[in-house]
Image (spheres, rainbow, N blue to C red):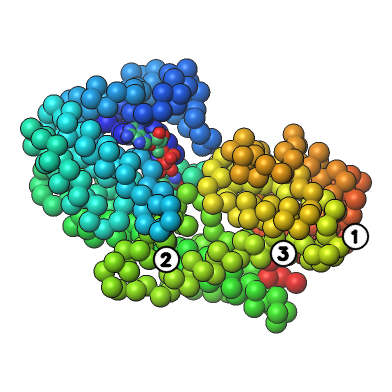
Amino acid sequence: MKIAMVGSGYVGLVSGACFADFGHDVICIDKDQGKIDRLHEGIMPIYEPGLDALVETNVKAGRLSFTTSLAEGIKDASAIFIAVGTPSRRGDGHADLSFVYAVAKEVGESLSNDAVIVTKSTVPVGTGDEVERILEDSGAKHRFAVVSNPEFLREGAAIGDFKRPDRIVIGAEDDFGRDVMSEVYRPLFLNESPILFTSRRTSELIKYAANAFLATKITFINEMADLCEKVGANVQDVSRGIGMDNRIGAKFLHAGPGYGGSCFPKDTLALLKTAEDYDSPTRIVEAVVKVNESRKRAMGRKVLEALGGVDEARGKKAALLGLTFKPNTDDMRDSPAIAVAQTLTDAGVEVSAYDPEGMELAQPLMPEVKMCDDPYAAIEGADATVIVTEWDAFRALDLSRVAELANSRVLVDLRNIYSPDDVRARGFIYASIGRE
Ligand SMILES: NC(=O)c1ccc[n+]([C@@H]2O[C@H](COP(=O)([O-])OP(=O)(O)OC[C@H]3O[C@@H](n4cnc5c(N)ncnc54)[C@H](O)[C@@H]3O)[C@@H](O)[C@H]2O)c1
């Protein structure tokens, strides 16, 4: 089956490469000429473990190709996926659907055979209806169906998630849509991945409900961590103690600096807007958004405290280890590191940083921060070393070297990857989350 993937970013490129690996004939389309040129040269435009090898194998096998031309790319495709960005709209927090609608219009104008148009981008309820209207208005002359197929992959583990999903959700309104999508995902039926067929609107809402629930779980344990600090309890044990209950589950119960990334912040906001529009407020999600937003700067204040308080901190130096919103990605969108760095520089702290993959994208977001070639270069002369993102490279720092290079033995661990007893035994002042 021929599949066209419009938008070759974190989702489009991974999905396209995985579909090709299943044996489909896939063409990834992007309007960013630089991105497509790099892909033609075998250079990945994003960092995602295993993606370069997967792309190379499938390009060599003739199953995966790239183009900037939508009309050329969608020719003969039975399924046309829309995987473009849906960022927060400036000013009001609604999902910005201009990229999705622009693609729908172009597809409608160029459609040269019967096809199913699949929204893989995360889009608010009712977007599929609007995509259908745009296709009709743009004079599409062939039979089409508009289907919702939200994506649940996690950056950093995207290929595994795509190939072995917990579930596939397909929102279709007719047999044409359902049949083509069954064919698209047939290789995964054989893997026995559960597939849930729903109405289109239900499918659209499932994606937002899933992300809002996960954001709530993270925010819940973050607030428990704050309480642990006040009452002298240990949040990691609280997480274990509640996570062993199957009704709760152990995942997404790691206290940290607040959720960030390309999805949770914008999707929780967009869900609030949908709820508002339909006069059906989602008060829990409202609270989650507020709590998470204030948490990021609170993490910066935690570092200031470790530096002796706001007044003492001015002129001191902090080293940030990890800048991306989570490990194994170069994605800096809404990373808590941005607010932490900002809080520190606002207080007159000199900040140096190291991240294995994120520094190029991070630098313009934190122009005052000095990027370093390795963790120890960042730590040199630091009055506090701060673990912001739990990259494996930071799990076994040479603490003797840190003690030698740093100005003070102060470690702030915003991801709880060290044992307080071990670090304190090495003569460090140690602060973490919910374990004081
Ligand atoms: N990143 C994730 O982990 C993730 C996970 C699940 C769902 N999603 C959702 O998937 C969607 C895409 O996210 P992403 O992170 O891959 O975004 P991205 O910004 O990495 O990629 C989007 C791509 O679309 C391209 N594009 C924009 N308009 C285009 C057009 N008219 N024609 C062709 N290409 C066009 C851009 O150049 C860009 O390369 C979003 O709705 C997001 O919420 C993302």
- Find out whether the residues at labels 3 and 2 contact each other: C-beta distance under 8 Å: no
Q: CA distance from mark 1 to mark 3?
A: 23 Å
Tell me the SS state at disc 1. Answer: loop
Q: Residue at x 90, y 60 (%)?
A: 427
Q: Which comes before the other along the chain, label 3 or label 2?
A: 2
Mark drawn on residue 301: 3
Q: Of the residues tagged 1 and 2, which is closer to the observer?
A: 2
Tell me the SS state at disc 3. Answer: helix
Q: Is residue 311 above or below residue 348?
A: below
Task: Classify 10 Å Cα crowding around label 1: few (below 14), some (14-19), many (20 and above).
Answer: few
Task: Classify 10 Å Cα crowding around label 2: few (below 14), some (14-19), many (20 and above).
Answer: some
Which residue is labeled 2 in the image? 213
Q: Residue at x 40, y 75 (%)?
A: 283
Q: Residue 426: percent from the left, percent from the top?
A: 88, 58
Which residue is labeled 1 in the image? 427
Specify whether 298 is left or right of 334. right
Mark drawn on residue 74: none
Image quarter of residue 405: top right
Specify whether 252 is left or right of 15. right
Quadrant that contains the N terminus: top left
Amino acid at circle 1:
Gly
Q: Residue at x 31, y 33 (%)?
A: 5
